[in-house]
Each structure stands twice: as structure tokens, then as C-alpha cells.
């Protein structure tokens, strides 16, 4: 273990975060996400909630300043919306964590099917044990100033 670094971060994850370059993306996904189908590099964190992992990563991870949204959430499927599904609780939690760690940064949305395509293009997919629905977020790495 290391001082001031969350105990949920492993050496493998820290190496991935360090090796990523400006504009590279990382997906933090829930337990239902088809990570091995959609990820080039997949790390498994089955005992960790997605928001806990996001809280551990963001203090170490510069968010990109180029896109309007450096953090993107998977939007609800139109069928879920039509069925009256309520907004996933994690959306608000993720947005709060992003803005607390990186003031001025906001979260945007990616349609569900597009999110899968984006995940295939990510540097890595980090699968958590998150069971709350739509617990998926993609982060774009910025530069260290």
C-alpha cells in the first residue's frame, strides 16, 4: 500500500492510468456490462462499487479540457425510458464526484449503443461489481500541467 492513494487502486490499474496519453479514454463499467466483449484491456474489480472506484481514480487523473464533456455516462435505452424507468441514482453521484474532483467539469451522455462502441475504443475497461443499473462512465485523460 501507499500513502494518500486509495487502497482500492491496484498496481495494474495505476500502471494503466499512468501509461494513458492525452485524449485516451477509460471506461468504468458495472457488473452487467459486457466488458470482455467490448474492451481491449479489461481489469476486474468485482468487490468494488463504481462510484468508489471513480472517487479513487479522479484525484490522480487529469480530465481532458478539449471535449465539452470529459466524462460521459451511458444514457438509458429508449425502451427503459418508455417504460418509465427513473433516472439512475448513479448519474447524480457520478456527476457530483466529477465536479468535486475537477471543478468546472461536467458529465454528458452517450446513447447506450454508442457507449459500447466508445468502450471498444477505450484504452482500458475497468469492470466493477456495481449492481446499480447504468453504472457506466467513460473518462477522457487530459494533460498534467
Image: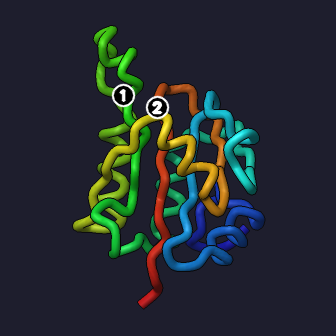
Q: Residue 68, position in %: x, y? A: 28, 64
Identify the image quadrant of the N terminus: bottom right
Which of the two discs, 1 and 2, labels the residue nearer the N terminus? Answer: 1
Residue in the image at 47% along x and 65% along y: 140
Residue in the image at 33% along x and 67% along y: 67
Discs 1, 2 touching: Cβ within 8 Å: yes
Cα–Cα span, label 1 and label 2: 6 Å
Q: Residue 97, position in %: x, y? A: 36, 53
Seen from this angle, which residue lies furthest top?
A: 83
| Marker count (numbered) | 2
The secondary element bearing badge 1 is classed as loop
Where 81 falls versus 96 (above or below)? above
Identify the image quadrant of the C terminus: bottom left
| Residue labelled with disc 1 | 88
**Is disc 1 surrounded by few (<14), some (14 to 19) or many (20+) residues within 10 Å?**
some
| Residue labelled with disc 2 | 134
Amino acid at each position: 500500500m501507499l500513502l494518500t492513494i486509495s487502497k482500492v487502486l491496484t498496481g495494474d490499474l495505476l500502471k494503466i492510468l499512468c501509461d494513458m496519453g492525452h485524449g485516451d479514454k477509460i471506461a468504468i463499467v458495472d457488473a452487467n456490462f459486457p466488458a470482455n466483449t467490448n474492451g481491449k484491456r479489461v481489469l476486474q474489480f468485482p468487490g468494488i462499487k463504481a462510484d468508489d472506484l471513480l472517487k479513487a481514480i479522479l484525484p490522480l487523473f487529469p480530465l481532458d479540457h478539449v471535449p465539452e464533456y470529459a466524462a460521459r455516462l451511458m444514457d438509458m435505452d429508449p425502451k427503459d425510458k418508455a417504460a418509465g424507468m427513473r433516472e439512475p441514482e448513479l448519474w447524480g453521484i457520478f456527476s457530483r464526484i466529477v465536479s468535486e474532483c475537477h471543478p468546472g467539469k461536467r458529465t454528458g451522455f452517450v446513447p447506450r449503443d454508442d457507449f459500447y462502441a466508445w468502450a471498444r475504443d477505450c484504452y482500458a475497461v475497468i469492470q466493477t461489481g456495481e449492481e446499480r443499473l447504468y453504472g457506466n462512465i467513460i473518462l477522457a485523460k487530459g494533460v498534467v500541467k
